[in-house]
Amino acid sequence: MGDIAIRVQGISKQYRLGKKERYQTLRDTLASTFTVPFQRVGRLLRGEGLDVAERNELIWALKDISVELRRGEAIGVIGANGSGKSTFLKILSRITEPTTGFAEIYGRVGSLLEVGTGFHPELTGRENTYLNGAILGMKRGEIDRKFDEIVAFSEVERFIDTPVKHYSSGMYLRLAFAVAAHLDPEILLVDEVLAVGDAGFQKKCLGKMGSVTKEGRTVLLVSHNMGAIAQLCARTIHLEQGRLKCIGPSTEVVSAYLSSSIGDDVKSSWFTDSSKPNHAEVRFSSARLLSVDEQPLSVVRFDSAFFVEIAYAVTVPIRDLSVSYKVHDTQGNLVFEAMDTDMPEWKGRVREPGQYRSICEVLPSFLKPGRYRISLGSFVEHVKMIEKQESVLSFDVSEVGYPLNPGRLGIVSPVLQWKVIG
Amino acid sequence: MEQTVQVIRIERSRGWVALQLKELWAYRELLYFLVWRDVKVRYKQTALGVSWAIIQPVFTMVVFSLFFGRLAKMPSDGIPYPLFSYAALVPWTFFSHGLTLASNSLVGSANLIKKVYFPRLAIPIASVTSGVIDFVIAFIVLLGMMIYYGIVPTLNVIWLPLLLLITFITSLGVSLWLSALNVQFRDVRYMIPFLTQLWLFATPIAYPSSLLSEPWRTLYSLNPMVGVVEGFRWALLGTDTAPGPILIVSSLAALALLVGGAFYFRRLEKTFADVV
Ligand SMILES: Nc1ncnc2c1ncn2[C@@H]1O[C@H](COP(=O)(O)OP(=O)(O)OP(=O)(O)O)[C@@H](O)[C@H]1O
Ligand SMILES: [Mg+2]
């Protein structure tokens, strides 16, 4: 047992989907108390199984996962949206119980499913540091000792006695991450907290995670950032629809995942799977690529502009909603991200319930020839993420009209204006 | 340096589960911070701050004095009616506030519950505890009123901490049931104002319990707040109501509520993160 940190044996987790297990009203329960027994008897009399009707409401968020983590190992967890990554972490951090199977954890666990959990807007930075530290499981003396270090890391010294409701969102995240980063359990479980903040901050987070893994702590890291996974973790688990698809050296698993998620064929249009219930405030309904003359397309000439069209329904009025998309290349690099609030028109405005389309024009002569995939997202900036859809589209940028050397370095290859003065 | 490693086993629990009070104790610092947050936020967010702790019971006392004391000429065990009702309203307000806050506490902390592990019992316990400050403030006003009316407390005041404890236990006991139910059925939230209202009149706050004759009076004290209220008047104002049997029945009822509530809460606890 000496060098095992986490042993997971056949863990499965079943969730009830739809309205049922969310919350019911007493009336529904009372009503079903009377009707359900009769329905069951009826079904039995008709010779049907008892749980036919009830079963389709259940999903296995995780199915039969077994894995062992060695002490001091950093292991990544990747997979599409809804593949069960967060559920896996929640089970290991004892937030929710598995339906079957068991896990054993050897050592003190710290889990970070979100930064800033429990931050209260009315409290000052100092007060929130203590509160959040306690929530994450730090002792008071420990926070006292690390306090100056945390504040220095967060770079918000001047505002440490200001209520955090007056913080900019960047400051808020910095402080929240700083507290979390000073947690030092033997085993650390981290879910996508690297995906917050601006580029500089993300870099800092990555650096911190890097040093954490080098200190010989056991780390389980969930991320959609394939670069980070490949860089920080030696091994990676790929989950697919709750099942363990494969586990192995990160570089192999990541590239297998990327090519499988792009697929062999380009997918130039996408429609939501309407059989899945979706209660989000913003629901993506479709996405596609259009040429300048509004024809759907899947291959783009290097030197021509094109449009990304995202259709979605808004179900409740939302102020400051941003609909965005990300473009990744086959190496997993995030090439760019764009959001419809980049245009000032919709900044600060409320989007009333209804159907919308956000259409973005992408510059010509900019994306290097090759294959790309597009992921969608909607959020209220600095406030909350609403929905994400990973890798809904993929497309090729063709060599047609590419004036540069094929071996040109860099992620993008913009054709820029030069002046040479003699 | 290889010490004994802490081993945690994670698997599905079934049926009734242990209370794990030892673990709760290990999380006492978190409990402390949750209480501290509740108190701090309450006083930061309200314009009148601390005065709310006084306004509510005092206002109710004034209304009761006018309607029950003046108009209905309610008997008050020989004590001036305002003092008679206020001495009951002080523990009552602690009880009903704690109940309201704690019953909604799990739903209000949904984000914590979904993202962090800790014994969930800490949440309602912290909510009820945070009311102690308000209690102390309202109690000081009570002392002021006693001086004004020239009433000297009896030696029985030494029982006050115990009476406060019974109030705490009752408030927490009821909240454990309600907060756990509230996660599943949001109807509970709408039930609470109604419940506290009924409970207020089922407790001898506006009237003395001496209106009831003996076997009924002890039976009546199955409502733990009966014992608390009578106890407060007896200890502070020296009412001659011989609350012994009442107090014993009330304490036992309070304990039963708490223990039952704690086990019920623990039983439902595993569903909180999935449902809330
Ligand atoms: N409390 C819940 N009740 C019902 N279903 C749930 C609940 N939590 C998660 N699920 C379902 O379990 C599945 C796995 O969800 P999970 O959050 O683990 O996905 P994920 O891999 O973390 O996705 P993402 O990349 O979007 O974070 C999803 O289908 C989700 O709808
Ligand atoms: Mg997730």
Image (cartoon, helix red, strand yellow):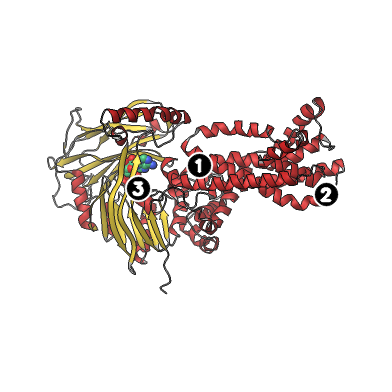
The residue drawn where x is 45% and y is 59% is A183
Q: Specify which label sits upstream in the sequence, 1 or 2.
A: 2
Can you tell which quarter of the image residue A184 is in? Answer: bottom left
Q: Which residue is mark 2?
A: B154
Disc 2 residue type (three-letter): Thr
Q: Which residue is mark 1?
A: B180
The residue closer to the viewer here, B65 or A116, is: B65
Residue A360 is tagged as none
Query: What percent of the width, then of the height, locates residue B170?
Result: 63, 44
Helix, strand or loop for disc 3: loop
Alpha carbon of mark 1 to alpha carbon of mark 3: how far? 21 Å
Can you tell which quarter of the image residue B150 is in? Answer: top right
Query: What percent of the width, then of the height, locates residue B28?
Result: 56, 56
Helix, strand or loop for disc 1: helix
Residue A99 is tagged as 3
The residue drawn where x is 37% and y is 67% is A215
Is A146 positioned to the left or the right of B66 in the image?
left
- Tell me if I can see residue B11 in this picture: yes
Disc 1 residue type (three-letter): Ala
